[in-house]
Structures are given as C-alpha cells and as structure tokens.
Amino acid sequence: MLYRLATIVDVPALAAIRSQDWETAEYWTKRIAAYMNRELHPQKALLPRVVYLATENENVAGFIAGHLTKRFKCDGELEWIDVIPAYQRKGIASELIRVLAAWFVQQKAFNICVNCAADNLSAQRFYKFNGAEDLQEHWLVWKDISVVLK
C-alpha cells in the first residue's frame, strides 16, 4: 500500500468512495474539490489542510482529510476518513491516521478532534483504539496526536 498526498485529479475517486455511504458522487466531487481548493470551510477551520490517500496498484483504497482549526479549542480536526470495504480491517485506516498525525505534528498541532456519531460504535471503537478519547457527544479528541506515531 502506498500513501501519498491527494491532488485535485484524485477527487472523482475520493467522491466515489465517500458516496458509498451518503449522498452522490456529484455532491462529494464538489465538496471535496472545494475543501481541497480552500473554498469550503468547516466551522472554525483554518486554511492549512491536507488530503492523503492510500493506493494499491494505482487504485485508491481509502483517504483521510484534515485541517487546522479552533473548534473546541483544538489545534486540528480530522475531517473525513474512508476505506473501501474490500480494504477494510487491514490496518489502512490506522495507517492513514498516522500519516495525518505526522502532518499535524509538522504543523505543531497536537490537540485534534474528530466528529463521530454517538451510535456509530464501530467508528467510536476504531478512534479509541487509535488513542482518541471522548470530548463530548459526537466528538472525540486526541489530546496529543503524536501518540499514534509511537
């Protein structure tokens, strides 16, 4: 598996993955492109942002996006993480978190939040397995995201 920065050329593949769970590929194409072009601003988001993807033989297996923020007095926010079903449970999502964590550390951003539905128990377990703690209903936090790099 190779991990690299996503470019605007990758947006259709990312949109196809994201639309498997919610909305259409067209919706996600516009939204992801606007996020990458710094035209879509999640609440209290700052401009530094990044999208990484995981590929195998040039096929996109998953991706992760994050940005700096002031939401909940955090330094950064994990915006999206998705891995296609055929690649799930192989450590790819955890590696994507490590890749994003390294970017956050380079930005001197350590306190990182992520939105997660309270009833999404598998996602809650995943984030907690990777070092996140409860922040409030629907939100988890890494008080120091560098813990995932150890």
Image (cartoon, helix red, strand yellow):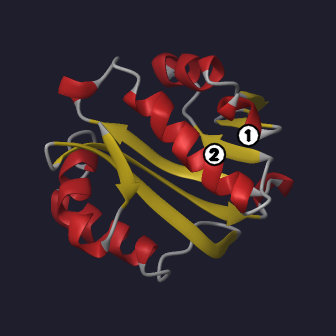
Task: Residue type at mark 1: give it.
Answer: Ile
Instruction: State the image coordinates of residue 13 (x, y, percent, origin top left).
Output: 18, 56
Q: Quadrant of the C terminus?
A: top right
Residue at image position (61%, 17%) is 129
Residue depicted at x 29% and y 74% = 8
144 or 4: nearer the viewer: 4
Instruction: Choose top left, top right, bottom left or bottom right for residue 47.
Output: bottom right
Where does residue 33 sit, x and y in percent of width and height? 33, 74
Q: Is residue 29 above or below residue 115?
A: below
Q: How many discs appear? A: 2
As measured in the structure, the alpha-carbon distance from the residue carrying label 2 to the one carrying label 1 is 6 Å
Disc 1, SS = helix
Residue under the image location 53 percent in, 21 percent down:
126
Depth check, front residue: 114 or 109: 109
Is 133 drawn above or below residue 26 in the view shown?
above
Tags 2 and 1 in contact by the CB under 8 Å rule? yes
Q: Assign the N terminus to one quadrant of the image.
A: top left
Location of residue 86 in the rendering, given as x and y in whole percent from the top left corner = 18, 25
Q: Look at mark 1 in the image and give the residue it sits on.
A: 145
Instruction: Give left or right: position of 21 versus 121.
Output: left
- Amino acid identity at mark 2: Ala
Q: Quick one: SS at disc 2?
A: helix
Q: Answer above or below: position of 144 versus 23.
A: above
Residue identified by numbered label 2: 101
> If you read the primary sequence from the N terminus, does the residue marked by circle 2 or circle 1 appear first?
2
Q: Is residue 101 above or below residue 28?
A: above
Label 2 crowd bin: few (<14), some (14–19), many (20+), radius 10 Å: many
Numbered label attached to residue 18: none
Give the x, y percent position of residue 78.
Answer: 58, 49
